[in-house]
Structures are given as C-alpha cells and as structure tokens.
Image (cartoon, helix red, strand yellow):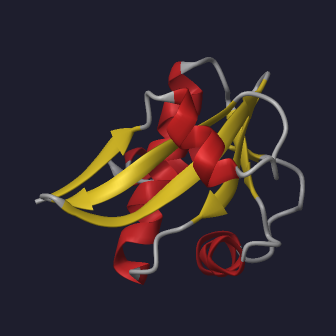
C-alpha cells in the first residue's frame, strides 16, 4: 500500500535538504510498505505553500505527492501554492495540470476544487 508520511525528524529533513532551501522546510516520504519510493520537500511561506523538490521517480505518484504537500500547507493556513519549476519533475507536473496558468502562486481551490464545480 502506498503511503505518504510526513517527515517528523529534523535530521532527516536536513539530510534531504542538504542546505539548498532556506526557511522551515518540511517534507513527506513516499513508501510502498517498507519500500522507500522517494520524498517531497516543501515550505509554507505565509499564505503560499512552495513545493521545492520532487524526489519521487514514479510519475504515477507525483500528483498525489504534490497534493499532499499543498494539503499540509493549506492545513497550516496557506491558500495558494507554487512549484519549483527548476525541478524537472515538478515543472512537468505543472505543465500537465496548469499549463498557461500565470507564474504567480495558484489558488488551492484550483487544485482541490475542480470536482465540486461539476456537481449540481
């Protein structure tokens, strides 16, 4: 079973971050039972969740991993998100889901609210 677990140990965040990103970096590890499938790093900057790095190679899991980061940011009070397009996997995710969207942060509603628009 695939699980996305928040990284609760600061030492693990520091190891994955390796000093590349400033601020209060947080993350998730993606697991299939005991098998490590990758990680995600993100930071909440006020009202914006910034997804910084995608260490998940399986493209079928990247969307869920990005959404987990944005949901955690929303839980912390963020109402918008941005992905680091210097990361090739995140740039591809953004191209697929938000091609043509402005570079400014995107409202969380655009990511999580799509299904509700079609109910009636």
User: Residue 83, how many percent across, how many down?
Assistant: 72, 58
Residue 63: name its quadrant.
Answer: bottom left
* Front position in the image: 10 or 49: 10
In the rendered structure, the answer to whether residue 51 lies left or right of residue 112 reads: right
In the rendered structure, the answer to whether residue 56 lies left or right of residue 83 reads: left
User: Residue 23, how many percent across, how many down?
Assistant: 81, 30
Count the marks: how many? 0
* Front position in the image: 22 or 95: 22
Image quadrant holding the N terminus, namely bottom left
In the rendered structure, the answer to whether residue 96 lies left or right of residue 91 reads: left
The residue that appears at 67% across and 29% down in the rendered structure is 79
The residue that appears at 51% across and 41% down in the rendered structure is 12
Image quadrant holding the C terminus, namely top left
Residue 113 visible (yes or no):
no
Residue 101 visible (yes or no):
yes
In the image as oriented, which residue stretches furthest toward the top?
Answer: 77
In this rendering, the answer to whether 32 lies above or below 21 is: below
In this rendering, the answer to whether 94 lies above or below 79 is: below
User: Residue 98, how many percent across, how many down?
Assistant: 68, 69
In this rendering, the answer to whether 31 lies above or below 62 is: above
The residue that appears at 79% across and 21% down in the rendered structure is 46
* Front position in the image: 10 or 46: 10
In the rendered structure, the answer to whether residue 15 lies left or right of residue 43 reads: left
* Front position in the image: 113 or 88: 88
The residue that appears at 73% across and 72% down in the rendered structure is 87
């Amino acid at each position: 079973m695939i699980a996305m677990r928040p990284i609760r140990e600061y030492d693990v965040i520091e190891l994955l971050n390796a000093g590349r990103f400033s601020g209060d970096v947080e993350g998730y590890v993606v697991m299939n039972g005991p098998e490590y499938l990758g990680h995600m790093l993100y930071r909440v900057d006020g009202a914006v969740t910034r997804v910084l790095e995608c260490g998940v190679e399986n493209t079928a899991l990247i969307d869920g991993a990005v959404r987990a980061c944005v949901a955690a940011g929303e839980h912390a009070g963020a109402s918008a998100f941005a992905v680091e397009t210097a990361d090739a996997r995140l740039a591809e995710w953004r191209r697929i889901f938000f091609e043509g969207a402005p570079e400014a942060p995107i409202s969380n509603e655009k990511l999580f609210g799509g299904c509700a628009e079609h109910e009636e």
